[in-house]
């Protein structure tokens, strides 16, 4: 009986270990399935986000194309194209044209604010507001448009346009500051002498004649082959006479 009892105990021990092994395998399997589920879910979200982003890009680019077409549309029945192609949009006045285009640029920024099309829409919207003499909105949009990489030409275009806004609103000191920042950051994206010329003109408007003379002189000394060299010489002579 003692031997049988020991045998039964041994069998019970084996059964318990076997059952424990089964439970362990079952738990491990659930963990594996759980991990697989997470991986699949992340994969599906990545795919969904990819298609969402692509759809956003396509929609924003299509809207931008329409807005720019309005921005460039003829006014007062003018014939825009030598080939005689009839434009989709035609406006009676510049104010009507820029107002209509601005609505589209506003919509792009509102619906697709994180796309490259929105960067361009902010810049173009700022230009429209400038032409409509809404200088506050022009400043807001151009400041936003400039918050991009200095490897992008919009970085410089927005600052040049912003300087024009400041010059027209008695903030020529701000205009000079904005242009000086662009000159420091320039990486041959735009001709630096053009930025310098605009900066010199801002100095003139701000009453900083010495700074303006120095800047025009730098253009003459450093950019002798530039098309702006002749204009810089004329402006320099005018300032020295005064």
Image: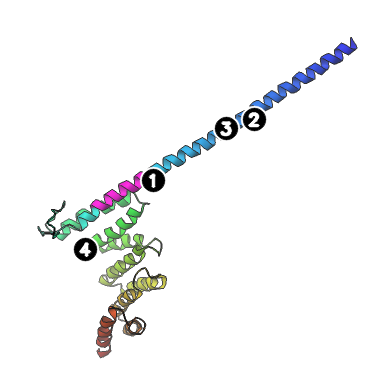
119 drawn magenta: no
The disc placed on residue 131 is 4
Q: Are marks 4 and 2 in contact (CB under 8 Å)?
A: no
Q: Is mark 3 in CB contact (under 8 Å) with mark 1?
A: no
Which secondary structure, mark 1?
helix
Report whether residue 103 is seen: no
Instruction: Identify the mark at residue 34; answer none if there is no mark.
Output: 3
Q: Position of residue 200 (x, y in %)?
A: 31, 79
For label 2, the residue is: 28
**Which callout, 2 or 3, points at the residue further toward the start of the chain?**
2
Earlier sequence position, callout 4 versus callout 2: 2
Q: CA distance from mark 1 to mark 4?
A: 33 Å
Left or right position of 221 against 15 = left
For the stretch drawn in magenta, the main secondary structure is: helix
> Does residue 203 sit above or below 127 in this rendering?
below
Q: Secondary structure at mark 3?
A: helix
Q: Quadrant of residue 180?
A: bottom left
Residue density around tag 2, few if under 14, some if 14–19, many if 20 or more, within 10 Å: few
Extent of the magenta region: 52-66
Q: Earlier in the sequence, mark 3 or mark 1?
A: 3
Question: Residue drawn 84% across and 15% down?
Answer: 7
Q: Residue furthest bottom?
A: 241
Q: Secondary structure at mark 2?
A: helix
Position of the C terminus by quadrant: bottom left
- Label of residue 36 in the image: none
- The image position of residue 143, as x and y in percent, is 35, 62
Q: Which callout, 1 or 4, points at the residue further toward the start of the chain? A: 1
Q: CA distance from mark 3 to mark 1?
A: 28 Å
Q: Position of residue 71 (x, y in %)?
A: 21, 57
Q: Residue at x 34, y 81 (%)?
A: 223
Q: Dot 1 surroundings within 10 Å: few (below 14), some, or many (20 or more)?
A: some
Q: CA distance from mark 2 to mark 1?
A: 37 Å
């Amino acid at each position: 009986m003692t031997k049988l009892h020991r045998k039964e105990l041994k069998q019970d021990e084996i059964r318990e270990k076997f059952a424990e092994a089964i439970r362990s395998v079952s738990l491990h399997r659930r963990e594996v399935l759980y991990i697989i589920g997470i991986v699949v879910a992340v994969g599906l979200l990545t795919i969904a986000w990819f298609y969402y982003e692509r759809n956003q890009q396509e929609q924003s680019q299509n809207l931008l194309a329409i807005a720019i077409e309005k921005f460039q549309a003829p006014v007062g029945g003018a014939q825009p194209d030598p080939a005689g192609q009839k434009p989709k949009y035609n406006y009676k006045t510049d104010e009507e044209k820029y107002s209509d285009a601005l609505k589209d640029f506003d919509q792009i920024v509102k619906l697709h604010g994180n796309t490259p099309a929105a960067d361009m829409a902010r810049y173009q919207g700022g230009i429209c507001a400038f032409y409509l003499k809404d200088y506050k909105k022009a400043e807001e949009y151009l400041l936003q448009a400039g918050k991009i990489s200095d490897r992008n030409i919009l970085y410089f275009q927005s600052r040049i346009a912003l300087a024009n806004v400041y010059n027209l609103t008695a903030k020529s000191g701000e205009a000079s500051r904005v242009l000086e920042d662009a000159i420091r950051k320039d990486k041959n994206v735009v001709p630096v002498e053009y930025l310098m010329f605009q900066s010199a003109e801002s100095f003139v408007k701000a009453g900083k004649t010495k700074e303006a003379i120095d800047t025009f002189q730098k253009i003459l000394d450093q950019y002798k082959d530039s098309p702006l060299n002749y204009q810089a010489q004329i402006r320099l002579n005018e300032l020295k006479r005064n």
